[in-house]
Every structure is written in C-alpha cells, then in structure tokens.
Amino acid sequence: MGFMREEHLPKIFASNCFESYRMCRIVDEQADSTTIAVQYIAHSMEDLNKYRAEHALELQREHMSKFGSDAVAYRSVLSILEEGDWEEV
C-alpha cells in the first residue's frame, strides 16, 4: 500500500478529476494473500472521461511496469444511486 499512498494516489489526484477515494481490503478467509480494492469518486462523468483520455494509460503502464502480473487490476465504472448514513426515523 506504500506505492498507492506515496506514488499512485498523488498522481491520480494531480489530474484534478477526482474528489475522494476508498481503499479496502477484500475479506476472504481462504485467500493466501491480501487483496486491495480502490474506488475513486470522480467529480463528474466528464472528469472521468478526461482522466481516461489524458492520464489513465500512463498510470496503467507505470502500475504494470512496477508489478507485472503480480498485481491484477480490474476497472469498472459505477454510478452512485444513493449514499448516506443510516438513521432510524
């Protein structure tokens, strides 16, 4: 996670396309290794498209150069329908 915090995240946010991120450990009691999932929240779909067009390929190349096949990356776009803190009424 040092690479993510020290190198990758600063470059992601230098694009000015994202407002926040979440880094989570995928819980799998049968797995022999730790798997991390990172979710980035873009300011808008326009900013996400800008990031993809202007920054994504270079950062993907850096990731592949550093980790090769030791770290697999899956990319998905999610549209937030609703979010918030639960409060019982």
Image (cartoon, helix red, strand yellow):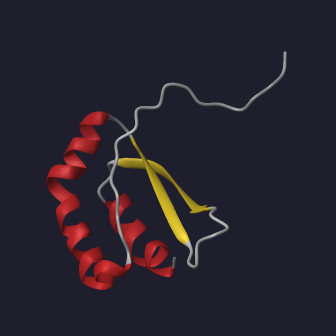
Q: Quadrant of the C terminus?
A: top right
Above or below: residue 28 compared with residue 1: above
Q: Position of residue 2 (x, y in %)?
A: 50, 80
Q: Residue furthest right?
A: 89
Count how many numbered circles sit on residues in the image: 0
Q: Is residue 57 left or right of residue 34?
A: left
Determine the image quadrant of residue 24. Answer: bottom right
Q: Position of residue 74 (x, y in %)?
A: 34, 58
The residue lying toward the viewer, choosing from 66 and 47, is 66
- Determine the residue positioned at 52% across, 66% down: 36
Q: Residue furthest left?
A: 53
- Determine the residue positioned at 56% across, 78% down: 33
- Determine the residue positioned at 44% across, 79% down: 3
Q: Residue furthest front?
A: 30
Q: Is residue 63 left or right of residue 52?
A: right
Determine the image quadrant of residue 49. Answer: top left
The residue lying toward the viewer, choosing from 41 and 37, is 37
Q: Residue furthest top?
A: 89
- Determine the residue positioned at 29% across, 35% down: 45
Q: Is residue 38 left or right of residue 55?
A: right
Q: Position of residue 29 (x, y in %)?
A: 67, 67
Q: Position of residue 25 (x, y in %)?
A: 59, 64
Q: Is residue 51 left or right of residue 70?
A: left
